[in-house]
Image (cartoon, coloured by chain):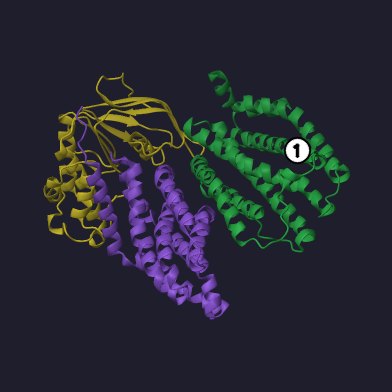
Chain colours: A purple, B green, C yellow
Amino acid sequence: MSVPQLSVSAFLRASLKRQLLLAYRRPADTLNPLLFFLLVVTLFPLGIGPEPAQLAEFAPGILWIVALLASLMAAEGMFRQDYEDGSLEQLLLSPQPLYLASLTYTAAHWLVTGLPLTLLSPLFATMLQLPVAALPVLILSMLLGTAVLSLVGSIGAALTVSLKRGGMLISLIIVPLYIPVLIFAAGAVRFAAEGFDPAPQLLLLAGMLSLAVALAPFAISAGLRISVDAG
Amino acid sequence: MWTWFHKLGSPPWMYRISGRILAILLPLTVLMLAVGAVWGLLYAPMDFKQGNSFRIIYFHVPASVVALAGYYVMAIAGAVSLIWRMKMAEVAMKCAAPVGAALTFLSLLSGAIWGKPTWGTYWVWDARITSMLILFFLYLGVMALYQAYENKEAAGKACAVLSLVGMVNIPIIYKSVDWWYSLHQPATIKFTEESAMHSSMLQPLLLMILAFYCLFTCALLLNMRSELLRRGAGTGWVRSLVGAH
Amino acid sequence: MSSAQPAAASALVTVRELGLERGGRLLLDNLDLDIAGHELVLIEGPNGSGKTTLLRSLAGLSRLGLTGSITRHCDELLYLGHRAGIKQLLTPRENLAWACRSQGWDAGAIDSALERVGLSGRADVFCQHLSAGQQRRVNLARLYLSFDAGRENALWLLDEPFTAIDRDGVAALAATMAEQVARGGAVVLTSHQDLPLDIPLRRLVLGGGA
């Protein structure tokens, strides 16, 4: 029997390129979470008052809660189109490893949501009076933390994509799993703002990211198989 | 070994055996709960700092411990159902969720009742209570996901995956909440010091924990029996069971 | 369930004691089936008799409510289902390039595949601007790509491949299937239309929904 010769790395590059091309052709999906981020950041000074000292104190928590919600919002639609148009079926039938394919989905999702959030976060942090000294730590925590959020969010998206009312449900099942990221990432930024060493929290975030990269694709693949079967 | 495994997968066998187990375990559980409650509430010495209000730990702590263990039971049953495609494990997983959620709720409720005389407020963002609240959400998530799927076989698989993800996350969640609490904790009373408890207080607590484990098992088995009947409605063994009575 | 045959040495897919339950109804019961190369199998039966589910099970997409075993021994598996599997925001050429990449087909065959489904002139238009029939044909181009890849032991699972295809298209498609079968592949399909083919056809009649 002649087993087809397939290059896995070429497949992964093509998969990533395809996801990014689709995101580029549907820019609203990328821009909406960012606008949402900006909008909710604006709500906080209006809700709790404009005093710089108070805002600065709450800034790490606010930034991270809003990033979490923006990421959640983006996660919901991750597999929706591919599920509805049958691309997921074809992906499952492809001889390529689903584990790696789901990683590229997540990577693409992070590149169009997590990364822009990270890049814009200094702007929002400044609006919330976060001390400039904490900005590098904020960016680093965003880089690591939003990647974990994307991986965990993909699990929720994979498990709920075949459900008609998946939107509310994905929040319910995913938000509790986001909590450690929120705690350590916001904690790191807070430490940095108060002049302490945030290295332990950042290392913990990096550890969570490695764990998520290793394990989440199994759950995502299993979720996709169940969803395609149930649909 | 394999015959045992196969028997475990057979609903009529499971129904019969669980009935026999319950006949013994249920009275035993009631007895232990009664003895533990009387011992803890009436005879154990009073806490010199908190007075009599501390006695609610005889419900709060066992409920918390078993609620957490219940999640692991659910997740492991889910793993077994995924790996060996064992229907009974899926039934166990599905039935463990509401029992665990109920215990988590009991833990939160007793914590709130305890909070009022201790801190003067019903809700405190203490590390353990916060962790229990998150655990409650994890249970609700599994139950909501199960409800959302129309195809119950798919629901079982999806929930098994979700509960396994939750199981990996629980230690991380607990550690992160502990760290978060130590970061924000104002210097108030710390009462999570069971290890320093006097043995006369500890013994009834251990009995109550054991009783709650048995309670969990009983509730799980009862729930599974009703689920087995529901799923088996119309099949031979349920008909003959109904006919026999 | 009819036309069970003894296990052939070159079976591309082997089904043993297959039972299928959907929505509390038993659609298949104890089905044994071997599909070998050179076979064209038409799955027939009324709506709701489990034709699509059986095809999806053969593809490995459907496992819910299934008992028994399905083993595939094919090097190439092509499944064309109700869902087109094409992206509205990609052009037919881009869609097929992705299909080639994920299946390991030769991307050089895309142009001829598009020509054969009559879409050469629309190769670089976003699929969302194509009609429903044209989108179906983009999906069908996969079949030609698989054909051109020319792998041995290829198993094609086609769910209503003739829907929304004009008569010439149907004839061309049927001819390709015949050729595929002639050179050793197996084709399993469902169809409400009669096949314009004069090669031996194996019929598998599902009656669960009747």
Element under label 1?
Answer: helix
Q: Residue furthest right?
A: B42
Left or right of C152, for residue B205: right
User: Closer to the camera, A28 or C76?
Assistant: A28
Q: Is residue A26 above or below residue A53?
A: above
Q: Is residue B151 left or right of residue A21?
A: right
- Give the image location of residue C168, x and y in percent: 15, 47
Name the residue furthest bottom.
Answer: A50
* Residue B64, position as x, y percentages in the image: 68, 46
Q: Which quadrant would residue A110 be assigned to in this image?
A: bottom left
Instruction: Please tell me how crowded label 1 is: few (under 14), some (14-19), or many (20+) other residues with Cα within 10 Å.
Output: some
The image quadrant that residue C174 belongs to is top left
Residue A153 visible in the picture: no
Q: Give percent across and percent down for residue A178.
A: 50, 55
Q: Which residue is mark 1?
A: B206
| Residue B24 relative to residue B5: left or right | right
Q: Hey, what amino acid is under mark 1?
A: Leu
Residue B98 seen in the figure:
yes
Give the quadrant of the N terminus of chain A. top left
Q: Nearer the viewer, residue A205 or C154?
A: A205
Give B90 or A99, whichever is nearer the viewer.
A99
Q: Nearer the viewer, residue B216 or A194?
A: A194
What's the residue at 43%, 48% (across, down)?
A212
Chain at numbered mark 1:
B
Number of dots carrying numbers: 1
